[in-house]
Amino acid sequence: MYKKILVPFDNGDKSLKALDMAIGLAKNFKASITIFASINISGFTLNFTSGFEPALVEDLEKRTQKLMETAINAAAEKARKEGITVNTEISYGIPGVAIVKYADKEDINLIVMGSNNRRGFDRVMLGSVSNFVLHQAHCPVLIVKD
């Protein structure tokens, strides 16, 4: 049924819970997991770093990528210790769009992701990645809540 599970990952508590759920599902279905991170520096750099030197912005991008690589590799190791075949992928762009594109391109069967439960102003300004993915993905999406 599910052979390829995608876990969008930001190293937060919700994505760690989603990873745990995906590991359990992967064991049951003998599926592989792809742990996927999307880095969206461009929105930050356009809004907050316009007065900074380009080298500072480039340094921020490199540091962000290095931090995410470390986190995603630790998450992958956790799944591998459970006997799961794991792939990792880091993408650049708007997270929801990047997740849906990757899922389509790689014929993902199930997306397992956390929800940050943003409310009010945060939700209006930041949107909801999980809501976007839920409505745009062409495969089932499991939202892991608290």
Image (cartoon, rainbow, N blue to C red):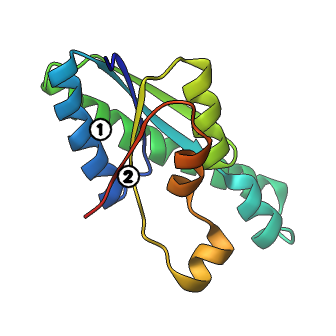
Q: Earlier in the sequence, mark 2 or mark 1?
A: 2
Quickly name the residue at label 1: 75
SS for callout 2: loop
Q: Can you give x and y, in whole percent of width and height, for residue 72 in the image?
A: 39, 38
Hey, what amino acid is under mark 2? Asn
Q: Does 92 sit above or below residue 88?
A: below
SS for callout 1: helix
Residue 68 appears in the picture as rendered: yes
Q: Quick one: quadrant of the C terminus?
A: bottom left
Q: Is residue 3 left or right of residue 139?
A: left
The extreme right residue here reads 51
* Label tally: 2
Within 10 angstroms of label 1, few (less than 14), some, or many (20 or more) residues?
many
Disc marking residue 11: 2
Q: Does 83 sit above or below residue 93?
A: above
Q: Does 111 sit above or below residue 46?
A: above
Judge by depth and name the residue closer to the eye, 117 or 39: 117
Residue appearing at x 47%, y 23% in the figure = 108
Residue 39 appears in the picture as rendered: no
Residue 48 is drawn in which quadrant?
bottom right
Hey, what amino acid is under mark 1? Ala
Residue 128 is drawn in which quadrant?
bottom right
Residue appearing at x 43%, y 27% in the figure = 88
Q: Is residue 88 left or right of residue 128?
A: left
Within 10 angstroms of label 2, few (less than 14), some, or many (20 or more) residues?
some
- Check whether the beta carbons of the residues at disc 2 and disc 1 lie within 8 A of each other: yes
Q: Is residue 125 left or right of residue 108?
A: right
